[in-house]
Each structure stands twice: as C-alpha cells, then as structure tokens.
Image (cartoon, grey):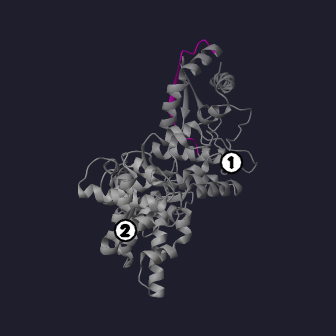
C-alpha cells in the first residue's frame, strides 16, 4: 500500500469516526470542539490530530479523547492511541488561473477569505482537509500576516474613550472596591494577571468607567500596545459587515492581533449564534497568546441568558468582580467629588437629600446634580432643598413609594448614626431618645397608622409616649433652626 493510499484509508476512517461523534455529542458540541480537529497522519499505532489552540487541545483531550480512541479502534484495530497537537490553521490558498484552489504544502486547505464555513475539499468532507470552523484566519499580529494589509486596530474598530473616565475620577467605596482593585491590577501589570477580567453589575454603577480607565492607563503608560474597546453590539455589527463584504480574514486578523481586547455589555450577544461562535474563537485565540481580555455585563457569567454553556464557563475562568449597588456613603462621596470637579456651590444638605433619594444608579445621580448646578448658574438662584425638589420633581416622583414605619426608622437611624434596634429599646440616653422622638413624629406625619400602632413599633410604648414625642419635636423645631432643618431634610427624603 502506497503512502497516499494509506492516508486515504485513514481519511475515510476518520470521516466515519467524525460521523459517529456528531451523532453522539450533537451538532452544537461537535461544531465547537470536534469539527476543528484535523487529521495529520499516523505513526505506527498512534493517530495524530491537530487543533488550532492549546485551550482547545486541553479541552478535547480532557473530554473526548477516550471516546475518539475507542471509535478509532473500532474502525481500525491497529490503532491503539491518539495524539492531539497544536497546529495553527493554514492561510487561505490562492486560486490559480483555472479557478481551482491551490492546496498548501502541509495538505490542509483553509477556507477562502470571507467564508463563514470551512472550504469543502475536493473528494468529500475529509477531516484531513477541512479547516477549523471560526479559525480560518490563523493567529497573526499586525505586520506579520505575509504581506496582508492590516490597518491600525485602534483607528478602525475601537470606540472613543471618555476623558472623564479615569482611575483618578473614580470614587471607591465598599460596593466597588474589588472591581476597582482588579481593574488597576490589569492596567498596571506587565504580564496578564487573570484572564479574562469580568466586571458585572447593574446599569450606571461604574463598569464602563473602569473599562475606560484601564484603556487610558495602558495607552499612557505603554503607547505601543494595541487596544480595542467596543460594545458587544459593535462587535456584532462589524462581524456581520465582514460576512457581507466577504472580508472575514481581515476582521479576524484585526481582533486577534491586539494586546488588549475590551468588550462592553457582552450580554447583547445572547441568542446570536454566529456572533457567539466568532467571539468564542477570538477569545480563545487571545487567551492562548496571553493577551488581556476585559469583559463587562449586567449579570455574572453563569446568569447570562442566551449564551452557550461553553462561553459562560470560559468567561468565568478568570476573575469575576461584582459591582454592588451603591451605599448612601458612596453616593454622597460621588456627589461631593462631582460638585468639586464642576466648581459648583451645592449645600451639603442638598447633596445628602440627593444621596438618600436617588439610589438607582450613579448616572441618574450625577444627572440630577448637573441639572441643579446648571439651573443655579443660568438663573442665578441659590440652591435650596425647595428648589431642588421643584427642579427634580420628575426624577423624585419616579422614586416615590409608600412610606412605612420600618423605612422611617431605618432613615432616622442612618441619619443620626444609631442602630434601628436602639429606637425600640428601653435606653433613655439623649443620643437615643431624640432620634426616637423624631422617628415617632415622622411616623405620625407621613403614615396613616394610629398612635397605638406607632407605639407598638417602638418597643410596645404607650400612645401617650408618641403624643409627647410629637409635641416635643414641634417645640424643638420652633426654637432650634438646625434641628428644624434636620427634621425637614428627613421629611423630604422620605416623601420626595
């Protein structure tokens, strides 16, 4: 038997093995992990197959090697083992004058540039000739693509960076300290500390700010590094454009030649199979080359909807950092920093009011402050709690909800820096008794609860105690301007 005849027999056997594998694991898993396998040849009783990345080699070896070996042995009893090696797929061949595709020297025919699927080799679906799906461009850096013209990545694909979003302007608090520390480590490290860095949290909590800050820091400290920052939607749009113009080769080379890839709002690729496939292979290629990947989303990797399990698993392989909803202290710190940056003279009571009332996200909080500062600057009126409430009536109305005794107790305790349990305790120290009286007063003013009901919520006190508290607070409000301002502030925070 000649060498070519032997290889032809191996190819036929491999085709049958592939067919059985597809039936056993299903189309999705087959396309992701087994279709990229190329038959290289056999040496003695060992069959050698190639995959394009180390990550894929490790996955196939750990999850499918035993089954592939068993199926091979069934096809050819002379095969006792398999070897999976890493081999970058070949560049797209150039068609000759007759229109036929010239086969590369290694016998692996790559898909033509722009093709979304591997090129079908002459003579059938031979694994020895099929290029790995999603990897037909190979892994090349800009300037190393055998003469192909690749435009500078940052100028063609990367989205604009907001100059305001730097590490210096990011206000750190307990809800975001892990994400901030991780982002700084990625930006400052000379080697990749964890891959990927996955930031997630609700809208307007600072994910995009941190991603821009990473990009700015790397750009300033190491301008030779190539960075792509863009949204998942833009990634999808560029991929679709490349498919339409049959220019997927340039698309792959641009994305896989960068030092840092940053994708914002990755949840938007959910349900888009073709985009997920390309993103998955781009992601693997960059990680395999030890290039940094930074991802953001509104949910953790395990909770992303419409995203394949293999992608969710891969996204969670590095460091996952949650940005929690803001606390009152963090919101107040952000407002103070923003007002200082703007040079706006905003009374502390107004900022405390905003920090208490607007709790949904930082973006809305800063927008409210901008509106107040702009009004003061344009109209020339002093900023007060009254003007603030009038200016922000639409925002505050959206945050309105029925006031409860529990909420009043929580706000008062927070304001006076005591524990909620102190308000219901038997302690009579003035530092506890005065906040308790204020809370009772506000319960009488803002709820429809009876005096006995209010008394029961404060440690089972009698209704006469509540009446005394209401009279005492009324008296103090008339004689103490600072006390009156405190009660007024709490009243506004609670009822908007």
**Which is nearer the eye, 335 or 211?**
335
Quick one: label 1, few (<14), some, or many (20+) residues within 10 Å? many
Left or right side of 376 for 247: right
User: Under tag 1, what secondary structure?
Assistant: loop
Q: Position of residue 345 (x, y in %)?
A: 36, 79
Q: Residue at x 68, y 43 (%)?
A: 117
Of all residues, the one furthest to the left in this rendering is 429
User: Under tag 2, what secondary structure?
Assistant: helix
**Which is nearer the eye, 329 or 24?**
329
Quick one: label 2, few (<14), some, or many (20+) residues within 10 Å? some
Inspect this view and state whether residue 252 appears: yes
* Quadrant housing residue 213: bottom left
In this rendering, the count of numbered labels is 2
Q: Residue at x 63, y 14 (%)?
A: 74
Query: Which residue does the numbered mark 1 point to in the structure image?
Result: 115
Left or right side of 144 for 249: right
- Residue 209's tag is none
- Compute the Cα span from label 2 to label 1: 78 Å
Q: Position of residue 469 (x, y in %)?
A: 35, 60
- Residue 474's tag is 2
Q: Residue at x 47, y 80 (%)?
A: 374
Q: Position of residue 360 (x, y in %)?
A: 49, 58
374 part of magenta stretch = no
Q: Position of residue 38 (x, y in %)?
A: 60, 32
Task: Provide the residue span drawn in magenta.
Answer: 76-90
Of all residues, the one furthest to the front in this rendering is 464
Quadrant that contains the N terminus = top right
Q: Residue at x 62, y 46 (%)?
A: 270
């Amino acid at each position: 038997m000649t060498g070519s005849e032997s290889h032809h027999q191996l190819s036929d056997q491999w085709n049958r093995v592939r067919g059985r594998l597809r039936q056993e694991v299903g189309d999705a898993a087959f396309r992701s992990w087994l279709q990229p396998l190329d038959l290289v040849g056999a040496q003695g009783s060992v069959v050698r197959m190639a995959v394009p990345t180390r990550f894929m080699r490790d996955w196939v070896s750990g999850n499918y090697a035993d089954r592939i070996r068993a199926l091979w042995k069934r096809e050819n009893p002379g095969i006792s083992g398999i070897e999976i090696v890493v081999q970058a797929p070949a560049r797209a061949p150039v068609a000759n004058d007759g229109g036929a595709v010239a086969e590369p020297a290694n016998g692996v025919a790559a898909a033509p540039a722009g093709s979304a699927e591997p090129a079908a080799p002459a003579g059938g679906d031979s694994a020895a000739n099929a290029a790995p799906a999603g990897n037909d461009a190979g892994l090349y850096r800009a300037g190393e693509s055998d003469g192909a013209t690749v435009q500078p990545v940052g100028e063609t694909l990367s989205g604009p960076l907001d100059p305001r979003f730097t590490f210096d302007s990011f206000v750190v608090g307990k809800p975001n300290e892990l994400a901030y520390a991780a982002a700084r480590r990625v930006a400052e490290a000379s080697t990749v500390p964890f891959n990927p860095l996955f930031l997630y949290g609700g809208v307007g909590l600072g994910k995009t700010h941190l991603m821009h800050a990473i990009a700015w820091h790397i750009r300033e400290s190491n301008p030779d590094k190539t960075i792509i920052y863009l949204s998942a939607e833009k990634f999808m749009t560029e991929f679709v454009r490349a498919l339409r113009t049959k220019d997927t080769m340039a698309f792959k080379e641009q994305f896989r030649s960068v030092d840092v890839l940053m994708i914002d709002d990755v949840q938007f690729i959910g349900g888009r199979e073709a985009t997920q496939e390309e993103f998955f292979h781009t992601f693997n290629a960059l990680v395999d080359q030890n290039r940094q990947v930074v991802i953001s989303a509104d949910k953790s990797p395990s909770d992303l909807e419409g995203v394949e399990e293999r992608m969710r698993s891969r996204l969670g392989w590095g460091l996952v950092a949650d940005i929690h909803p803001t606390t009152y202290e963090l919101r107040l710190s952000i407002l103070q920093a923003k007002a200082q940056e703007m040079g706006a003279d905003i009374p502390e009571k107004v900022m405390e009011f905003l920090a208490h009332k607007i709790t949904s996200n930082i973006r809305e909080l800063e927008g409210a402050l901008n509106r107040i500062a702009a009004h003061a600057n344009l109209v020339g009126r002093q900023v007060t709690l009254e003007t603030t409430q009038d200016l922000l009536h639409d925002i505050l109305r959206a945050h309105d909800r029925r006031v409860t005794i529990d909420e009043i107790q929580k706000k008062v305790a927070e304001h006076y820096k005591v524990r909620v349990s102190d308000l219901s305790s038997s302690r009579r120290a003035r530092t506890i008794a005065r906040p308790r009286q204020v809370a009772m007063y506000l319960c009488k003013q803002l709820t429809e609860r009876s005096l006995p009901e209010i008394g029961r919520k404060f440690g089972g006190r009698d209704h006469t105690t509540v009446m005394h508290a209401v009279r005492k607070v009324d008296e103090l409000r008339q004689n103490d301007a600072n006390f009156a301002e405190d009660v007024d502030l709490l009243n506004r925070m609670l009822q908007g």
